[in-house]
Image: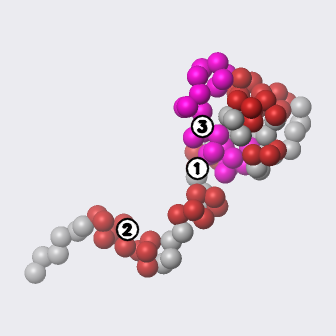
Amino acid sequence: MIRAVYAGGMFGKKKTQDKYDEDKDLREGRFVAAEQTNLPLNDFMTRLISQELPLLDSHERTDIYRLLREYAESGGAVITSQEELPTRIREILDL
């Protein structure tokens, strides 16, 4: 008897058996791309901002980059929540 390798069972089944929590993984998971940035944001906030940037026009994206750079240069603490974002960034993102 030959058993075919089925990707759905191979990759998806374990997640349901070990009580995989997608929301927890998004909030607490490890994302190498987020770790390789030079931003005053923690990994979770880096991922949130990166998901919003494609929805903005180039002028708004440029403003966000500039504001984050200025925030980092001023010695601001690492941003860990939306409430800690500079006011202008929250306005641009409509938070």
Residue visible at 37% across and 68% down? Answer: 12
Calculate the distance from the C-alpha at mark 3 to the C-alpha at mark 2. Answer: 28 Å
SS assignment at label 2: helix
Task: From the top left corner, tell me how far across and down residue 93 is, in percent.
Answer: 68, 34
Where residue 79 sits: x, y (%)? 79, 45
Residue type at the position of mark 2? Gly
SS class, disc 3:
helix
Whichever of callouts 3 and 2 sits on the residue coming sooner in the sequence is 2
Residue furthest to the front: 94
Q: Which mark is residue 32?
A: 1
Question: Would residue 39 be seen by someone viewing this image from the given angle?
Answer: no
Q: At label 3, which amino acid type do we have?
A: Glu
Residue 52 numbered mark, or none: 3
Which residues are drawn in magenta? 41-62
Tell me which colouring the rendered structure shows.
secondary structure
Residue labelled with disc 2? 12
Q: Which comes before the other along the chain, label 3 or label 1?
A: 1
| Image quadrant in which you'd find residue 50 | top right
Rendered residue at 69%/35% (across/down): 94
Comparing 86 with 28, the one in front is: 86
